[in-house]
Image (tube, rainbow, N blue to C red):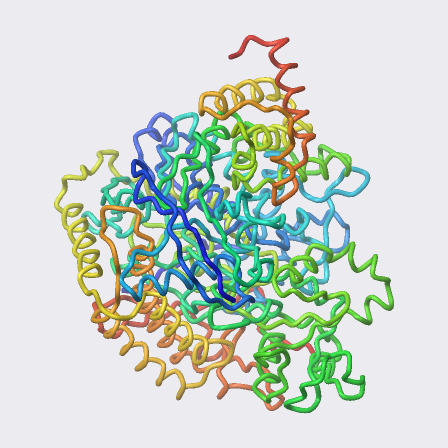
Amino acid sequence: MKLTLKIWRQKHANDKGKLVDYNVDINPEMSFLEMLDDLNEKLAERGEEPIAFDHDCREGICGTCNLYINGRPHGPIRTTTCQLHMRHFHEGESIVIEPWRARSFPVVKDLIVDRSAFDRIVQAGGYISVNTGSAPDANEIPIPKQIADEAFNSAACIACGACVAACKNASAMLFVGAQISKFALVPQGKAEKKIRAEKMVAQMDAEGFGACTNTGACSAECPVEISMTNIARLNREYIGAKLTSDNV
Amino acid sequence: MKLDAKIPEGPLAEKWTKHKFNLKLVNPANKRKYDIIVVGTGLAGASAAASLAELGYNVKAFTFHDSPRRAHSIAAQGGINAAKNYQNDGDSVYRLFYDTVKGGDYRAREGNVYRLAEVSVNIIDQCVAQGVPFAREYGGLLANRSFGGAQVSRTFYARGQTGQQLLLGAYSAMSRQVANGKIKLYTRTEMLDLVMVDGRARGIITRNLITGQIEKHSGHAVLLCTGGYGNVFYLSTNAMGCNVTAAWRAHKKGAFFGNPCFTQIHPTCIPVSGEYQSKLTLMSESLRNDGRVWVPKKAGDTRKPEDIPEAERDYFLERRYPSFGNLVPRDVASRNAKYVCDEGRGVGNTKMAVYLDFADAIKRDSEKVISAKYGNLFDMYEKITGENPYKTPMRIYPAVHYTMGGLWVDYNLMTTIPGCYALGEANFSDHGANRLGASALMQGLADGYFVIPYTIGDYLATLPAAKVDTTHAAFTEAEKAVIDSIKRLLSINGTKTVDQFHKELGKIMWDYCGMSRHAEGLKGAKAKIRALKEEFWQNVKVLGVNEELNQTLEKASRVADFIELGELMVEDALQRNESCGGHFREEFQTEDGEAKRDDANYAYVAAWEYKGYNQPEELHKEDLIFENVKLTQRSYK
């Protein structure tokens, strides 16, 4: 299978960067990242510097891989980049491969960006304050199955950042909504729900993420199908907190 | 040196309680004077970092990932065991202990395993309090399932993403302490050496993976929570970044390596499809509850599975193990798949796979029922292979999944280097020669949440609070050694890429030190690895410079360590003249081809001491004493 890859190359954070063409001939059974591995091996053999990209588990769960393929985060099907296979492309196709584009995710090198803003948002309040050893018996607080399932759906977020990359405003509302929802839904998380919403939103704003205009591109591109309900819940939690609290 | 496991005296059920009382404490006001370095932020590292910071220690946490939440614990699917006995089905701390010792084929310590079972119940409480969304029944209470052939339902789970949810719990606890200023977090930072001062671990040397800066970090203790070394096989279910470097560098500084040859091969993985393959994907072994494993009866049968009539199929697990059938333990299922493929009866293009067929289950229960149980796994399979498992049988083959071996630790989780600890998969301790399903998550969190917070105080209480400055000669020397080694890698400028070396190593390990081993093969492998090591240092090609993000350089230094580790694994497999758990030596099997243990001569932990480059390592033996469990032959017939 012959393809032309147009790949973003950028030496370091302050370099201007450009798209570079690579012609490859690959086995269509390969995964997208295996295609890049293969290209990197060939580049290395020729003495050219391999293309830097982030990846780790290659099972779609760690959230590390993050390529912007033909203008879509994680490419043409709804999955993580590592779970995308070349059989979804056709002979002779040109594929444009770029890093996530967002002010809050600065490019580190080539296709690698810095997503530490997500960690800082979690540090601002994405937890339940319980020290090790002070927990009551696990079955003391019954949680209806439906609620537990809904909390799980929010907690399934892999923090890849596709939502931000998909959004024309580079908004992180879907990510933050998921983090807030998974705690707001369950009884253990209720004690801190106000301050959590206030602090996480304040940090999100401080990181420079854009505003949400409810176009839904984030959820449509999310590889683990985090729903727009999380954004609605975030708004509700945040407004509720702001109306009754003067914490932040 | 005599190995002292420091297992407390007294009856099994009282050991840990008594030990906790006897451990020295660090006064709350003094805890803030101690700095603890935690390397790795998976389940063991994140839980340890959070718990120690909560106690008041200053923690420095290091990960080579861009975020602590990316550690490979996140990929664990099945669940976590705990002896809660919520199902009223006869479970108890003692039963979980017993099952784990037996499952490990009697090569684990009774004292450690009992403690693991004991604290397992606290783990579930802790995780629920953190908000981990475990599966629940309609009444709102926690759901359990039986896992990996266990006869009780003691596994807690969060769909097929238990590891993810547990890690996010530990990550959130850790994030809270980062905000409190008690944890300083270093992401994209890799440990490259351990610093020893007066015979104690007092710091680490790291490389900033973005700038290439070599940094020195001083602390009163160092915790290695750096996972397993399955990637020594090149192809495994581990993440691409999983490596042995931190543990191996500590080994070279004096930490003994325990049972390196004990690796676990998981039977239900998606087979290799070609040379370009970069990693293998595990599918939960719960699939074996309904899937039937088979191959054609005759070798070289190229017909499609649906064209092979029932009478010409060999359901080899059901045939050989009528009572356990497709549910035999991981090691047995894996080995049998290898045998039928070696006989030329493998299926698929590569002939290195067996069928896992759901046709009967679908006929019996309907497609809807099967889809409700395994829908996500079937989707994943189809995504990767392009085949629909509702219509045609899945193809599976065993893959390296977990390493039971690791740094030798005593009951306090301390390695043979004072002040250097190993937690989680990085240590050798609790799984013996074979790990049971849903036990890895349990062990990682037990070590981090409930063991190290107690045991580390006992060490620190005797250690003066004065800090060692990073200008100390020991730091400068270690830093220089790291820099020299990087310079050497960059200066070779050979003709073979790092991946080529890694693939070659993986092939040697898989062929001779994988699912089944024999002395001749192992001896040959030793020579091959030695030659590969020589060639590596003369002919590896590492492009670029140190002072930038350089993924090839990162990988080169990891592969160099894997090669050395590979040599030790082979040595370890060679000295263990018995078959037990994941270690199957062809010379030592019963008449009907099952593993034959030798308890009289091999009921010990092999702990290896590094003796210098290219020098044979010295074997130390820690005898395993069984006071509570009677050693029996595992039988699944």
User: Image height check: is B291 above or below B315?
Assistant: above
Relative image position of residue A211 (x, y in whole percent): 55, 22
Name the foreground residue: B120 vs B252. B252
> At 30% across and 36% down in the image, what residue appears?
A14
Relative image position of residue B510 (x, y in whole percent): 45, 75
Q: Residue furthest left?
A: B473
The answer, for residue B458, to whether it is visible in the render is no
Q: Is residue B296 left or right of residue B483?
A: right
Name the foreground residue: B480 vs A131. B480
Name the foreground residue: A235 vs A40. A40
Q: Is residue B310 left or right of residue A80?
A: right
Residue A36 found in image quarter: bottom left
Name the foreground residue: B161 vs B125. B161
Residue B604 found in image quarter: bottom left
Q: Residue furthest front?
A: A92
Relative image position of residue B79 (x, y in whole percent): 63, 52
Q: Is residue B175 left or right of residue B153?
A: left
- The number of numbered badges drawn on the structure is 0
User: Image height check: is B634 above or below B627?
Assistant: below
Which image quarter holds the N terminus of chain B?
Answer: bottom left
> At 26% across and 61% down in the image, what residue appears?
B542
The answer, for residue B95, to whether it is visible in the render is yes
Which image quarter holds the C terminus of chain B?
Answer: bottom right
Relative image position of residue B417 (x, y in whole percent): 29, 54
Residue B615 found in image quarter: bottom left
